Image: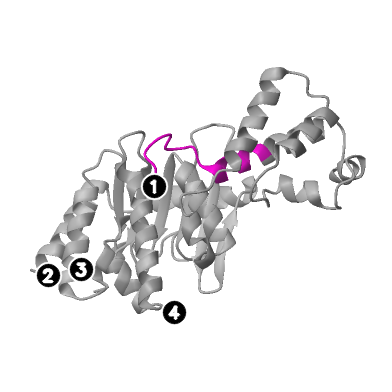
Amino acid sequence: MPETEPRRSPTLRRRQLSAELRMLREAAGLTAVDVDRRLDWTPGKLARMERGHWQRPRPRDITDLLDLYSVEDDDRREYLLMLARQGRERDWWHPYRKMLSERYSTYLGLEAGAASLLTFQSGMLPGLIQTADYARAIMRDGPAELSTDEIDARVLIRAARQELLTREQDPLRLVAVLDEAVLHRNVGGDAVMRDQLEQLLELAELPRVTIQVAPFDIGAHPGLSGPFTILQFPEPKDPDAAYSENIAGQLLLEEETDVERFQVAYQRLIAVAASPADSIAMIDRHKRAMT
């Protein structure tokens, strides 16, 4: 993953451009259907653009829209055209695109541009903090039948994502809440699990990484409905997003009312989980018990 301009994520730029274009259309008092007709576009083209369903924005299309919306401010026009140009760039995961679903690809692009990531996991550790051997064991014994080459490629993707936590410029802030069951589940054998727990302890020392454990003795808690992740972005105008996945596929939510439910659940979850210090002590005890 490139070290320069760490938050210059083409996916995030396309998301920003979609939101800007939607606001300009609404301010102009036009519907998406009106715009398609006036520009002689295929029906539904603008709606897809505003939903972010595009791969490489065309600057000519953006110029046509700005003219139609009577946007005369040169700085404003140049900013939106810059978003279009940067949105045409390839995301870091592009070489692996054939093995990734559209939603997961979008998630990776948003993750690369996020300022903070809040995640809860109940069955396994989050991908951002998995060792390579732990990840291989998860994939090898998981629900999908993957070849050795496919597993190796997915481990490389996971390793590239983990650079977000340790890059020199503006590293990603991670808050990870783990159900205690994750610590007890011996993934890959004792040696793999000991290395994994040791990596957890090392990552917890990073200033922008917080790890908490939801212990068994708290009983029911807000994470029992399943794992999920909340992405927060550096610009206030970029709304949070929520992500969840299971065997059926991935779910990426961006509507404010949908994301708010995850935000409330996460705040309730943090409140009942063990403190970061107590959580680290718990992880350390598990690691020592395996030696």
**Which residue is at 55% across, 48% downward?**
241
Q: Disc 3 and disc 2: Cα gap in Å? A: 8 Å
Left or right: 55, with 244 as reference point: right
| Residue at horizontal 35 percent and vertical 79 percent from the top | 141
SS at badge 2: loop
**Cβ atoms at labels 4 and 1 below 8 Å apart:** no
First reached walking from the N terminus: tag 4 or tag 1: 1
Residue beneath label 2, please? 290
Give the image location of residue 151, x and y in percent. 37, 71
- Is the C-beta separation of discs 1 and 2 under 8 Å? no
Q: Which residues are magenta?
A: 1-17
N-terminal label among 1 and 2: 1
User: Would you name the residue on which mark 1 appears?
Assistant: 1
Three-letter code for the amino acid on which mark 4 is drawn: Pro
Residue at 28% across, 53% down: 274
Inspect the image, locate mark 1, and give the three-letter code of the amino acid beneath it. Met
Numbered badge on residue 193 = 3
Between 109 and 223, the residue placed more toward the observer is: 109
Q: Which residue is mark 4?
A: 143
Disc 4 to disc 1, how far (Cα)? 28 Å
Mark 1 neighbour class, 10 Å CA radius: few under 14, some 14 to 19, many 20 or more = some
10 and 287: which is toward the camera: 10
- Marks 4 and 1: which is nearer the front? 1
**Left or right of 103 in this view: 76:** right
